[in-house]
Amino acid sequence: MASKELRIKIFSYDQAALDQTCRKIIEIARNNNCDIKGPIPFPTRKEIFTICRAPHVNKPSMEQFEKRTHKRLIVLENVTPTLLDVLKRLNMPNNIEVKIKF
């Protein structure tokens, strides 16, 4: 029994780890004869935080920090139950977030 479509969204602050995880998922899908679309890059979300260094003495002295969230989408078609089991057991780095939608 083959499922129609599986959408895998991957989020990370580290672009290199994100691309490495995408390559692993694509390699596993190719080994299981699955149709692959992607990885499709989504726009990078950029958050900038401004923090005052010394609020009393040097009020105009501020620091800015930036956090970038990189996103990718992989669409797998003709997914088999064995492929789902392999993807569930896949070891991911700690800084990677994965959302799977059927």
Image (tube, rainbow, N blue to C red):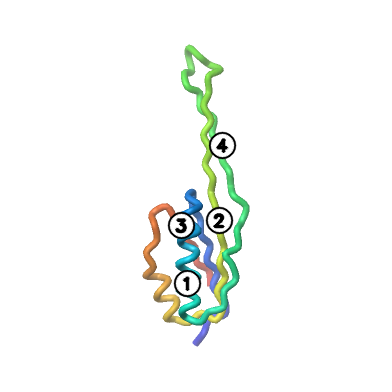
Residue type, label 3: Glu
Label 4 is placed on what type of residue? Ile
Q: State the SS at label 2.
A: strand
The extreme top residue here reads 57
Mark nearest the camera among 1 and 4 is: 1
Measuring from the top left, give residue 70's x and y in whole percent: 54, 52
Residue 38, located in which quarter of the rendered image? bottom right
Q: In this view of the protein, which residue sits in the foreground, 31 or 60?
A: 31
Report the Cα–Cα distance between label 4 and label 3.
21 Å
Q: Position of residue 53 (x, y in %)?
A: 47, 22
Q: Which mark is residue 71?
A: 2
Q: Earlier in the sequence, mark 2 or mark 3?
A: 2
Give the mark nearer the N terminus: 1 vs 4: 1
Distance between mark 4 and mark 2 Cα atoms: 18 Å
Q: Which mark is residue 97?
A: 3
Badge 4 element? strand
